[in-house]
Image: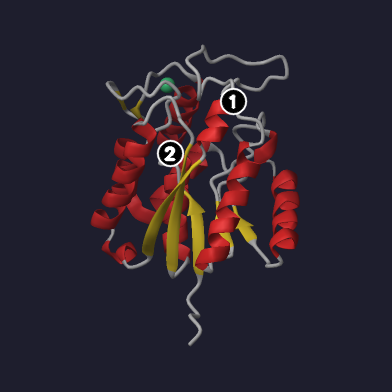
Amino acid sequence: MTDKRSKALIMFSGGQDSATCLAWALDKFDYVETLGFNYEQRHSIEMQCRQRVLANMRAAFPNWTGTLGDDHIIDLSALGAMSDTSLTRDVEISLSEEGLPNTFVPGRNLIFLNFAAALGYRRGLTTLIGGMCEADFSGYPDCRIETLNAQMKAISLGMDRTFTLETPLMHLSKAQAWALAHELGGQGLIDLILEDTHSCYKGERKVRHDWGYGCGTCPACDLRAKGWESYSRGL
Ligand code: ZN
């Protein structure tokens, strides 16, 4: 018997964007599996937060519990070993001459998509979901829609199966992403994202700001703080 439920595989890192995407996916699809990549991030904190978000999403939203399926972790330590960036080495976060933060792992999303599709192929999940966002981080060329469309075409040809990619946050600002989270899960989801997701490049979780945990000074914290401030003003 064919399973006619709508199904998807979401790339879920445990950050604000992917948690919002996960809620979006649980709201839209009948069945969702999650995928995380382990590539020697400087801080395993992100992986811990990831598990906490999943557990609390199940606990706090009973409507979504039956929709949230298996979680997968793929080890991509080769990516960490070859990348000389702030995410993977203990160096200062700065901007390169091209204006790209040196946290940028060249082509990271392209690599992620290939692995996600390979897993999706085996799991029967041809709809992939990712939190890529063009609006805030235009410095990342592998987050742009042209790049992603080309990659999805190559994957579909290369695997001889039609894969689609959903990027619900693509054109949203960080403030609009908070608004989307509120629309999907109310204040309960906002609180979960504030408390459990991780964005800070430095892995700092000692200080709780009104926008969540973080060092408060790195580009990721800065973006998150500004997005929260702008969202809060609009309430
Ligand atoms: Zn930070």
Query: Dividing the picture into quarters, in which one does residue 153 lie?
Result: bottom right
Badge 2 density bin: few <14, some 14–19, many ≥20, Cα 10 Å: many
Q: Give left or right: position of 28 versus 82.
A: left
* Outermost bottom residue: 1
Residue at label 1?
Answer: 83
Give the residue type that dot 1 points to.
Answer: Ser
> Closer to the N terminus: mark 2 or mark 1?
2
Element type at mark 1:
loop
* Distance (Cα) linking label 2 and label 1: 21 Å
The x, y position of residue 103, in whole percent, is: 56, 24
User: Tag 2: residue type?
Assistant: Gly
Residue at the image point whose x is 68% and y is 67% from the top:
161
Q: Position of residue 2 (x, y in %)?
A: 51, 84
Q: Position of residue 47 (x, y in %)?
A: 37, 38
Q: Measuring 68% from the left and 66% from the top, which residue is drawn there?
A: 162
Camera-near label (2 vs 1) is: 1
- Coordinates of residue 122 in the picture (x, y in percent): 54, 65
**Mark 2 highlights which residue?**
15
What residue is drawn where x is 68% and y is 19%? 99
At 43% across and 54% down in the image, what residue appears? 34
